Every structure is written in C-alpha cells, then in structure tokens.
C-alpha cells in the first residue's frame, strides 16, 4: 500500500472519531465501508489496531476503548488544539488528502506560497535530532553576508517563513530566517542542549519570532465591527482573554505579552478594526506610527 493511502486511512479514523465522539468497532467498520476508505475492502480489527499504534506514534493521539460500552474514542483531543508539530502534520496531511481526492477542482483552489527556505529543512532537522552544530551562511536584507557556527535549538514557522532558533558561540540566542540562509552544513561537532529547555516556553511571552528584551505588558485592545469575531475564532496569543463586549459593535480583549514589532505589526494589520487602550506607552507608540505613515499619503 502506498504511504499516501495509509496516511489517508489514519486521517479518516481520527476525523471520524472527532466527529462522532465514540464508536464501536462495528460502527467504524460500517462507516469505513460506506465511505469506501480502502476501495471497498472491509476494515480488519488487526489493521485497525496497527493504525491506532501508528496514529499514537505519529500524532500523539491516543485512541482508547471504553471497557463498558466497547466504544473507541480519542482520550486526549486537546493535542489537536495547540501549535504542536503533531497538529501541523495532521492539518497538512488532511489538506493533502482532501485535495488529492479533488483533483478535478484543483484549478479552483487557491493556495498561499509554500514556506520559503525549505531546502535547508532536512539538514537543520537532522542537526537538531543529533545535537550537532551547523555552519550557516547568512545575509540580512541590506547587509553583507557572513558565515557562523551555531547550535540549532528549534524551528518555528511564522507567516510563511521558517525560522531557526540557535545559540551562538558567544552564548547568545538568535533567530535566523531560512530564506536568508545561503548555506547550511552539518558539522562533526556536537553540543549539549540545556536540561529542560522548551521552545514553546521560550516563545510563550511573544507573538511571532522576535524575542528581544521588550518588557512584559498587560495589553488591552478594543476590537470593532467584525474584528471581534476574527479574534475569537483565531486568537492572537494563548494569553488572549475577552473582557467585555458591547451591543454597539465592539469587544475588549487583553493580552499578557511582550509587545514586540511582530505583535504591533499584527495589530496594525487589522487597520481601524483595533484600537489599543492599554498600556498608554503602547497606545502612544502606535499613534505615532500611524501619524508617520499618514505623512506618506
């Protein structure tokens, strides 16, 4: 069986259990037949058990069986609600499977450009996996290029660009955009990852990839018109909380975050749909940015 077919079966099992919550094996088997998941071939219990193991290994999704009802269910559905690599892989494979089955309408599906810099992904991931230093060639916009040896800690995808979080020989944490790299070569020299280092925790106080010394702030914004719905359905940050909503067409949201340029840029991208209320320093900063921009018009 081709890998694409196997992945499709994994995705079908996951999505079917997410939709119906709990199902017996016989119910799953009937739906499998009805949807012609394997070209009309029935779902064997041995195959289902192998798929359960593979789903756990690939997506960290646990499919348990209730001993009282003999119904199968996903016991840790929260794993598909965060920004983990398992969630990203699941989403990617789901879209791939849907589009593969919809080749007849491929000209009517408009996609974004693929993330830039993916030619270095394999090398960087191998370096991360083996704790080996990388020699990278790098050139920022408007500056001369240079070569540097770094310890690769983590990768992050943000706004269609891949970024590498790495420690330099000066023991400084730096972010490198993969589309600014001119080379990425694996070295024979290894390094030791700090005990307990967690990339998710490292980025937790930020939006995006900029991780400078901007102080933590309690940010309150007022969202107008349809913007509250956008923030509710796709929160900007895990600290986002809705404070109040008003029938006149606005809602207030709070964030406990370091308001770096990435976060400010995201707020400005909503145009007049968002007004910063607190802190006063951030409100003034954005006001000055808008005033300077108006001078260009």
Image (tube, rainbow, N blue to C red):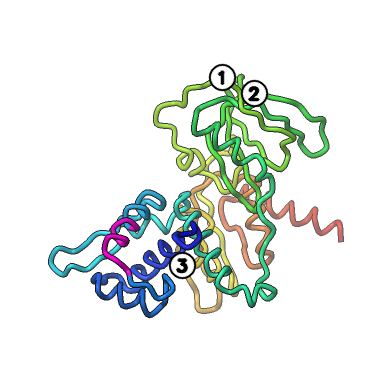
Q: Position of residue 236 (x, y in %)?
A: 54, 57
Q: Quadrant of residue 221?
A: bottom right
Tell me the number on the disc at residue 16.
Answer: none
Toward the viewer: 254 or 231? 231
Label 1's element? strand
- In space, the residues marked 3 and 2 are separated at their CA atoms by 49 Å
- In space, the residues marked 1 and 3 are separated at their CA atoms by 54 Å
- The region drawn magenta spans 43-51
**Mark 3 neighbour class, 10 Å CA radius: few under 14, some 14 to 19, many 20 or more:** few
- In space, the residues marked 2 and 1 are separated at their CA atoms by 10 Å
From the image, give the main secondary structure of the stretch colored magenta: helix
Label 2's element? strand
Q: Quadrant of residue 124?
A: top right
Q: Quadrant of residue 296?
A: bottom right
| Residue at figure coordinates x 46%, y 50% from the top left | 84
Tell me the number on the disc at residue 244.
Answer: 3
Toward the viewer: 227 or 179? 179
- Residue holding disc 1: 189
Q: Earlier in the sequence, mark 1 or mark 3?
A: 1
Query: Which is more foreground, mark 3 or mark 2?
Result: 2
- Residue holding disc 2: 149
């Amino acid at each position: 069986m081709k890998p694409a077919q196997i992945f499709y079966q994994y995705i079908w099992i996951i999505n079917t259990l997410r939709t119906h919550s709990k199902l017996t094996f016989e119910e799953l088997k009937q739906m499998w037949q009805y949807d012609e998941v394997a070209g009309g071939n029935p779902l064997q219990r041995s195959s289902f058990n192998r798929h359960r193991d593979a789903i756990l290994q690939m997506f960290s999704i646990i499919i348990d069986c209730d001993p009282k009802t003999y119904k199968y269910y996903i016991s840790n559905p929260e794993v598909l609600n965060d920004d983990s690599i398992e969630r990203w892989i699941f989403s990617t494979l789901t879209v791939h499977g849907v589009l593969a089955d919809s080749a007849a309408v491929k000209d009517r599906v408009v996609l974004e450009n693929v993330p830039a810099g993916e030619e270095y992904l394999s090398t960087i991931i191998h370096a991360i996996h083996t704790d080996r230093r990388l020699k990278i060639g790098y050139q920022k916009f408007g500056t001369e290029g240079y070569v540097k040896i770094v310890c690769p800690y983590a990768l992050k995808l943000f706004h269609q660009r891949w970024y590498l979080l790495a420690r330099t020989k000066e023991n400084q944490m730096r972010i490198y955009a993969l589309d600014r790299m001119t080379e990425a070569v694996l070295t024979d020299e290894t390094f030791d990852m700090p005990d307990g280092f967690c990339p998710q925790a490292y980025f937790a106080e930020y939006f995006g990839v900029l991780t400078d010394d901007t102080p933590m702030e309690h940010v309150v914004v007022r969202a107008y018109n349809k913007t509250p719905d956008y923030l509710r359905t796709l929160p900007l940050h895990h600290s986002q909380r809705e404070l109040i909503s008003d029938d006149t067409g606005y809602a207030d949201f709070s964030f406990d975050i370091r308001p770096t340029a990435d976060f400010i840029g995201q707020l400005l991208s909503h145009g007049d749909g968002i007004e910063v209320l607190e802190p006063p320093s951030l409100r003034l900063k954005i006001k000055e940015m808008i005033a300077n921009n108006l001078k260009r018009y």
